[in-house]
């Protein structure tokens, strides 16, 4: 019986392979494993289900949902976290991220501005940069963008993104010499960035 079964199994496998091997592939494929992000999502969702009044759990679930690209659900969770802890500026900043990624720059700006007012000195630069970035790229408000990127730089002058963005604003305003200075500062921190390199070449060529 054992020998006969081996022959039958062998013939089945040969038939599968002769037919393209598709069923054979499905048969031997190892089970799919969940990613670390999926496991995080399940973990935070479970924590929220067990304790829906915990703002930290909801905020962490919201941030994980952002990473998963589920921006609508992320907005709901982060807003719920803020309803529990209205003064939590980090939650508000993340809510701004969710709105921006969801294609709602006006709502993102509102959340970022509220968060910026709450962040302590020395921790405002990232949110100020995000506001400036929206004003520059989405709203084409050069003066408003310049105002907020200057706040970002004043809060922390070692962030190349802010220096680069300020250079872009100045270049758009036609202030090439000042733009070059900001690009050079940005290059001190991240000279290998293609955007910074191209910007420096561009203003040099414009001055020639």
Image (cartoon, rainbow, N blue to C red):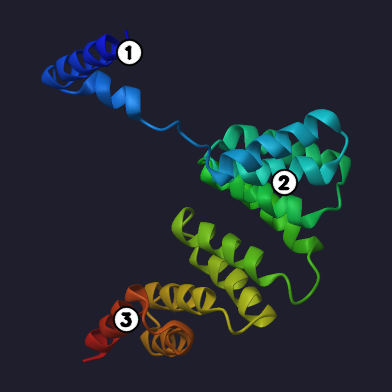
Q: Position of residue 159 (x, y in %)?
A: 56, 79
- Mark 3–mark 1 CB contact (< 8 Å): no
Depth order, front residue of 15/60: 15
Q: Position of residue 92 (x, y in %)?
A: 73, 50
> Element at badge 3?
helix
Q: Name the residue located 63 percent from the left edge and 44 percent from the top edge.
A: 64
Is residue 129 visible to us here?
yes
> Element at badge 1?
helix
Q: Which residue is mark 1?
A: 2
Q: Which residue is mark 3?
A: 197
The first of marks 2 and 1 along the sequence is 1
Q: Which residue is mark 2?
A: 60
Depth order, front residue of 194/204: 194
Query: Which residue is outermost to the left?
Result: 18
Which of discs 3 and 1 lies nearer the camera? The answer is 1
Q: Name the residue located 46 percent from the left edge and 90 percent from the top edge.
A: 188
Q: Position of residue 128 (x, y in %)?
A: 64, 66
Disc 3/disc 1 C-alpha distance (Å)? 71 Å
The first of marks 3 and 2 along the sequence is 2
Image: 100 above or below 115: above
Quadrant in which residue 104 is drawn: top right
Q: Name the residue located 79 percent from the left edge and 34 percent from the top edge.
A: 48
Image-based side of 108 in relation to 50, left or right: left
Quadrant in which residue 168 is drawn: bottom left
């Amino acid at each position: 019986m054992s020998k006969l079964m081996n022959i039958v199994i062998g013939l089945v496998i040969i038939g599968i392979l002769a037919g393209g091997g598709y069923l054979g592939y499905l048969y031997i494929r190892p089970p799919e494993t969940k990613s670390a992000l999926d496991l995080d999502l399940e973990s935070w969702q479970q924590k929220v289900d067990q304790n829906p009044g915990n703002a930290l759990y909801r905020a962490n679930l919201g941030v994980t949902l952002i990473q998963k690209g589920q921006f609508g659900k992320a907005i709901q969770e982060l807003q719920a976290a803020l309803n529990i802890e209205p003064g939590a500026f980090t939650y508000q900043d993340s809510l701004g991220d969710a709105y921006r990624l969801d294609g709602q720059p006006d709502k993102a700006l509102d959340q970022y501005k509220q968060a910026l007012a709450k962040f302590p000195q020395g921790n405002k630069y990232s949110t100020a940069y995000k506001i400036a970035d929206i004003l520059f790229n989405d709203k084409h408000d050069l003066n408003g963008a310049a105002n907020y990127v200057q706040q970002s730089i004043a809060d922390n002058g070692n962030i190349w993104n802010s220096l680069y963005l300020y250079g872009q604003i100045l270049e758009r305003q036609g202030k090439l010499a000042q733009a070059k200075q900001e690009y050079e500062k940005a290059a001190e921190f991240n000279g290998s960035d293609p955007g910074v390199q191209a910007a420096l070449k561009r203003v040099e060529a414009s001055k020639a």
